[in-house]
Structure formats: C-alpha cells, structure tokens
C-alpha cells in the first residue's frame, strides 16, 4: 500500500520505517529541512536501537523516501492514508497544544489529499468536529494512537500488545486493518473519541501506578521495609501484574507528564472534578526532591560536594532528555551548591542544552566522571552502569556514597565491593 507519514520524530520515523519494513511504500514528510536531509543520507537524527539499519535497508530498497513538503511528497503518489505524527506538547496551562496538528490538517486540505487521515499524535478526545473542520470538506478522519516506548520503539512497533483504531465507518476500519495486516495482534475498533481516551487512559494509568509505587517507596524508607520485596509481593498478584512497578526518584519522558496534565485539563474543561489525575504529576516532581533531600542528609550537605552523575536520558537506550528526572535532579544538586561530573552514553548533547552551568564537567566515560568525587548518582538505568566494575568504582570513590535514582543497581554486587546503595525505599540491613 502507498502510505504517507507526516512528522519524522520518535513516533513518525518509527512508523515510516516500520511500515516500509513491512512491505508498504512510504513517503515521510517533515518541515525540518535539516532532518529531512539527514534522513535522505539514511542517518537517524536521534538514537533509537534498531532504527538505523532498517532506515538504510528500506531507503536503499526504494520503499522509503523523505520530503520537506507534503506537496512534493504527494506528486505522482496516491496514498491510501496519511498518518499524522507531529508533536502535541503542553501549553503553559497544561492543556494540549494542537497547533502542529492543526497546521498539518490544513495543509492536507490545501494539497487536496483524498484519503483517510489517521491521527497518531496524542490528542484530546472530543475535538473530532474541529479537526474535520481543519481538513475541510470531504476529509475522513481516524485515530490510531501510538503506545511505543522510547528505547524499545522498533520492538514495540513489530510486537505491540494491541492496535487501537478509532473510525467512523467500516470502510475506514478496513483501510487500517489492511495497513496492519502484517501484525498478528488484537485490533480494537472503537469510536475516535474512545481511541483517543484510551491513549490518555493508558499513560495516566501507568503514571499513576508509578507515582503510587514511588509514594510507597517513601513509606518503605521510614518504616524500614524494602520496596523491591513489596514490588515482588504485589506484582505476583495477577490482578496487579509485575511490569511497571519499579519505584525510583520519579519518572520522565516527553509524554507521561504532558498527557496526564492534558487529561486533567480535558476533565476540568468539561466540568468533571478530578481528584486523582493532577496530583500524579505533583507527586512525581516531589519524588525527585525527596531523593535529593535524602542525599543531602546522608552526605551532610550537598553544598561544596563534587558528584558524579551517571545518566541523563529519561530511559535507557534513548538520547531523549525531555522531562528527564536526571536533568531535574542535576539542576537541584547544582542549585544546592554541588559540582557535577556527568556522563551518559547517548544523551550528552541533548543534556548540555538543558543544563548550562560552569559547575558541570561533561565527561567522556563513566570512569572519568568518577575522578575526585564525593558521591555517585545513577539516574538512568543504562546496562553499562548496571554491569560496572564495582570494585573499581569503590576504589575511585572510596569513602563516598552511591545513590540510585532508578532502584536499578545490583545491590549484592555493590555490597561485595563494600558499598551500600541508597535508592528509594531500599532497605539495607
Ligand atoms: P517529535 O517532536 O519527536 O517529532 C515531531 C516531528 O514532527 C518533528 O520532527 C517536527 O519537525 C515534525 N513536524 C512538526 N510540524 C510539522 C508539519 N507541519 N509538517 C511536517 N512535519 C512537522 O514528537 P514525537 O515524540 O514523535 O511525538 C509525536 C506525537 O506522538 C505526540 O503527540 C506524542 O504525544 C505522541 N507519542 C509519542 C511517543 C514517544 O515515545 N515519543 C509515544 C506515543 C505517542
Ligand atoms: C510511555 C508509555 O510506556 C508508552 O506506552 C507511550 O506510548 C509513551 O509513554 C508515550 O505516549 O509517549 P516512554 O515514556 O517512552 O513510554 O517510556 P517508558 O518506558 O514508559 O518510561 C517512562 C518513564 O517511567 C521513564 O522515566 C522510566 O524510567 C519510568 N519507569 C518505567 C519507572 O520509573 N518505573 C518503571 O517500572 C517503569
């Protein structure tokens, strides 16, 4: 099938490359000319495992081409559908900024594409009529929210738990069934509003689960319990399940915070009093501060201390630092008078744009970051941090402390090197 994808970011590029890999012929459009040039050279403009090889192979096979204008992409190319994958960030008041989606829809209308317009961007439910208005007469709208995780995006594309599609006719349903015919997974068909609410509900449910686990970790800290035992204890209850229970110093990423806030705004706009949704984010911010407070106490004050920070990305296997707790925590350490020695395997360049301070030394390796420090903070769960040579780390920071903001370190290995791991709710007998 001929398919157009608009937006070559984390979602759009994965969608474009994934659909091409599945055998479709894909044209991908992005207004960022530099990004398009980079993609034409088969270079991925960000870090996502497994994407580069497939981008190169499918570009070489002629199934994938990049354009900086929809008009050019649509010349001699009739798409059965166009996927809208542009950003939907938060406005200052927490509501969803739809300006990029609006611009794309109007452009689709202007170019006169006569095909199904599938919104993959996360957008608030209840705006179907307005969006159809942006497309102009004859525009057909569908929703196909995305559930991929950064750092595992290709894996999630080819093995999602499910596909959710929101459509208003069986004809549109069939188009999307045909697009995804290569996947052997359940497809849930519903109204456009239900599909959009499903997306917000999934992110809010996951974020609420994490904020609850983080709060339980704070309780574990004061009652002398171990949150990792609690995780095992409740995760084995099939009604609860074990994924997504790991507590830490707060979650991050471009979507949980913005989507939870946007859903809270949807509720208030429609006069629904929400008691649960808004506090999820407040709890998340507080969690990072709680972690720094704890470190401050254990270090006898942060001011004047030199601290190694391992990890800037919000998740392992990505270079994305949007809403990263590592950035938030580092900024708090700096504001309390610390000097930082920072290393991340992939996210250094993005982090440098967020943290501009003469008190930060950007290091070439995790070992270099350890030189002359009083403490080590591990803030992203990269595999190379988990498998560090703990004897060597112990030698480098002798007398220092290790803080684990992701509760991810192998505590037994670290203990063998003579150190305790200070995480969130970790009981060190
Ligand atoms: P992104 O910022 O990485 O990418 C958006 C891309 O769209 C950019 O390259 C930008 O240049 C391009 N763009 C903007 N306006 C355009 C226009 N008029 N024409 C063509 N291109 C245009 O964003 P993202 O992280 O890929 O997220 C996209 C959407 O998917 C958001 O709604 C987000 O909430 C949702 N989502 C993201 C993830 C994720 O893990 N990042 C997962 C699920 C859903
Ligand atoms: C999340 C959702 O998991 C995706 O389904 C969704 O598509 C995406 O948001 C989105 O809408 O953008 P993502 O933010 O990319 O994906 O990454 P996750 O793996 O969900 O991690 C988010 C944050 O939660 C990270 O900071 C991670 O460290 C943290 N986390 C995750 C925990 O603190 N504990 C856990 O047990 C799991």
Image (spheres, grey):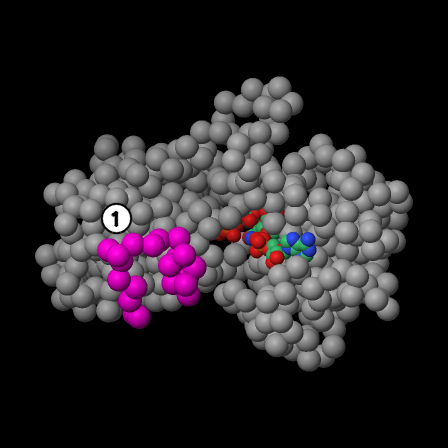
Image quarter (top left, top right, bottom left or bottom right) of the C terminus: top left
How far across and down, in percent of the image, does residue 55 sit? 63, 72
Outermost residue to the bottom: 60
Name the side, left or right, on which 425 lies relative to 267. left
Question: Secondary structure under badge 1?
Answer: helix
Q: Which residue in the protein does label 1 denote?
A: 334
Q: Is residue 421 visible?
A: no
Q: For label 1, count other residues whose C-alpha is less than 10 Å away and answer few (under 14), some (14-19) or many (20+).
A: many
How far across and down, in percent of the image, does residue 86 sit? 64, 52
Q: Is 213 in front, or is 102?
A: 102
Q: Is 391 in front, or is 11?
A: 11
Q: Is 361 in front, or is 317?
A: 361
Q: Residue at x 61, y 40 (%)?
A: 97
Q: Is residue 139 visible?
A: yes
Q: Residue at x 23, y 32 (%)?
A: 223
Residue 342, by quadrant, is bottom left
Q: Is residue 364 magenta?
A: yes
The boundaries of the magenta stretch are: 346-366
Name the side, left or right, on which 336 lies relative to 240. left
Residue 290, by quadrant, is top left
Q: Residue at x 36, y 63 (%)?
A: 344
Q: Residue at x 68, y 80 (%)?
A: 60
Image quarter (top left, top right, bottom left or bottom right) of the N terminus: bottom right
How far across and down, in percent of the image, does residue 262 sit? 57, 35
Task: Please give the count of numbered marks on the rendered protein.
Answer: 1
How far across and down, in percent of the image, does residue 13 sit? 63, 62
Outermost residue to the left: 399
Residue 376 vs 168, above or below: the answer is below
């Amino acid at each position: 099938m001929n398919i157009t994808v608009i937006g070559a970011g984390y979602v759009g590029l994965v969608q474009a490359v994934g659909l091409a890999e599945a055998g479709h012929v894909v044209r991908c459009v992005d207004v960022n000319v530099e990004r398009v040039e980079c993609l034409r050279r088969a270079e991925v403009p960000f870090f996502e495992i497994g994407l580069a090889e497939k981008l190169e192979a499918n570009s070489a096979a002629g199934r994938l081409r990049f354009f900086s204008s929809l008009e050019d992409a649509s010349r001699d190319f009739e798409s059965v559908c166009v996927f809208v994958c542009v950003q939907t960030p938060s406005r200052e008041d927490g509501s969803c900024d739809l300006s990029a989606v609006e611009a794309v829809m109007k452009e689709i209308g202007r170019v006169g594409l006569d095909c199904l317009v599938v919104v993959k961007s996360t957008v608030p439910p209840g705006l179907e009529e307005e969006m159809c208005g942006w497309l102009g007469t004859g525009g057909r709208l569908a929703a196909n929210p995305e559930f991929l995780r950064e750092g595992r995006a290709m894996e999630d594309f080819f093995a999602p738990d499910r596909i959710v599609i929101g459509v208003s006719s069986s004809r549109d349903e069939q188009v999307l069934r045909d697009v995804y015919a290569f996947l052997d997974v359940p497809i849930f068909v519903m109204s456009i509003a239900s599909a959009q609410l499903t997306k917000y509900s999934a992110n809010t449910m996951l974020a609420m689960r994490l904020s609850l686990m983080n709060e339980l970790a704070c309780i574990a800290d004061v009652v002398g319990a171990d949150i990792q035992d609690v995780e095992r204890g409740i995760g084995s209850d099939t009604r609860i399940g074990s994924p997504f229970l790991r507590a830490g110093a707060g979650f991050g990423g471009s979507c949980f915070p913005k989507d939870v806030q946007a859903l809270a705004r949807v509720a208030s706009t429609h006069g629904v009093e929400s008691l649960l949704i808004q506090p999820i984010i407040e709890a998340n911010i507080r969690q990072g501060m709680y972690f720094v407070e704890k470190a401050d106490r254990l270090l006898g004050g942060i001011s004047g201390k030199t601290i190694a920070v391992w990890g800037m990305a919000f998740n392992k296997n990505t270079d994305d630092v949007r809403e990263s707790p590592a950035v938030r925590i580092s900024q708090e350490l700096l504001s309390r008078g610390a000097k930082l020695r920072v290393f991340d395997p992939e996210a250094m360049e993005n982090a440098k744009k967020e943290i501009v301070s003469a008190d930060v030394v950007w290091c070439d390796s995790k070992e270099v970051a350890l030189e002359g420090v009083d403490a080590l903070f591990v803030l992203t769960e990269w595999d190379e941090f988990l498998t560090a040579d703990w004897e060597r780390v112990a030698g480098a920071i002798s007398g220092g402390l290790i803080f684990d903001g992701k509760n991810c370190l192998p505590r037994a290995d670290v203990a063998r090197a003579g150190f305790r791991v200070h995480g969130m709710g970790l009981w060190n007998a």
